[in-house]
Amino acid sequence: MADGPRYQRIADLLREEIRAGKWKPGDRLPSHNELADQMQVSITTARNAIQVLVAENIVYTATSRGTIVRSHEVLESVVTNHIRPDRPPSSHDIFVEIARAAGREPSKQFSARMEPASSEVAHWLGVDKDSWVVSRTVMQYLDNEPWSWEVSFYPRDLAEATGIDCPHDIPEGTTRRLADRGFAETAYRDTVVARPATAEEAAVLGVATGTLLLDHLRIGATHERITRVTRHRSTAARNRLAYELGDDPGTDIIRKTLGTPLPPANSHSFENSLLPSSP
């Protein structure tokens, strides 16, 4: 190992082993105790070495599984797909559809609660501050790796009328649930920004504080009212957002030219109004 602090030299060695393929995405690295024994160093030195790789987003830590090598595959999401009127019926939501199309295994952790609307949420939904809203939080995983953090807010009366206030995940997704209960969304406003992760976001997503995130905010509405606001946060380096706008013939030409149903696209920071009538 090269000169430098012992923890840095161990981190350098592990990094090179990962790059050489000794440790593949999803593999568990030696525990702190195992690494300390192998390298003849203290547990503190071993822990510090692992933290270097965590800060570089090469590995992440899972309470029940230890230190896991991250995947570097980029997942592309065509974020207009789920609002296309010709989207085939499915018992799964859009995240599951996209993940399986990419050959990845999706899983989720879900929670829901009633809470008073913050000033920010009240502004987005067009309701009074501190009025009751339903929040639905989904932590999404690909091959057990933390992938994205999604929090959606709904006006209380709408959530109760559509069953979105239920304490479990809705397999087909809330967009279809709203439509099935007579509240089909007809317009969306999306804002996508790239920014550093806060300490809270870093802890939830298993990345280093300051890691560049994509913060995607979507506000949905019917002709009569705002129905929801969804905030979706994911690591920018491993996620790519694509928008398909226009009529079906034009969209088909683009897809056929690119030769894939999920066309490559660069990540963008912009605001755009999206209408399902113009998929």
Image: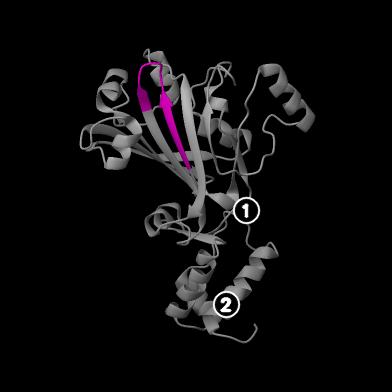
Relative side of 35 to 170, left or right? right
Relative side of 237 to 185, left or right? right
Secondary structure of residue under mark 1: loop
Q: Mark 2 vs mark 1: which is more N-terminal?
A: 2
Residue situated in front as seen by the camera: 25 or 164 = 164
Magenta part of the protein: which range? 216-227
Residue situated in front as seen by the camera: 166 or 252 = 252
Query: Is residue 253 rendered magenta in the image?
Result: no
Give the image location of residue 63, x and y in percent.
40, 58
Number of residues whose C-alpha sits closer than 10 Å to that of mark 2, classed few (under 14), some (14–19) or many (20 or more): many
**Picture quarter containing residue 58?**
bottom right
Type of secondary structure dominating the magenta stretch: strand
**Circle 2 sits on which residue?**
10
Instruction: Give how far apart the Cα atoms at labels 2 and 1 are.
Output: 22 Å
Relative side of 226 to 242, left or right? left
| Residue located at (54% from left, 61% from top) | 59
Number of residues whose C-alpha sits closer than 10 Å to that of mark 1, classed few (under 14), some (14–19) or many (20 or more): few
**Circle 1 sits on which residue?**
72
Say above or below: 9 vs 80.
Answer: below
Give the image location of residue 246, x and y in percent.
64, 22
Residue situated in front as seen by the camera: 28 or 207 = 207
Q: What's the amino acid at mark 2?
A: Ile
Relative side of 189 to 124, left or right? right
| Residue located at (61% from left, 44% from top) | 267
**Picture quarter containing residue 143?**
top right
Residue situated in front as seen by the camera: 239 or 173 = 239
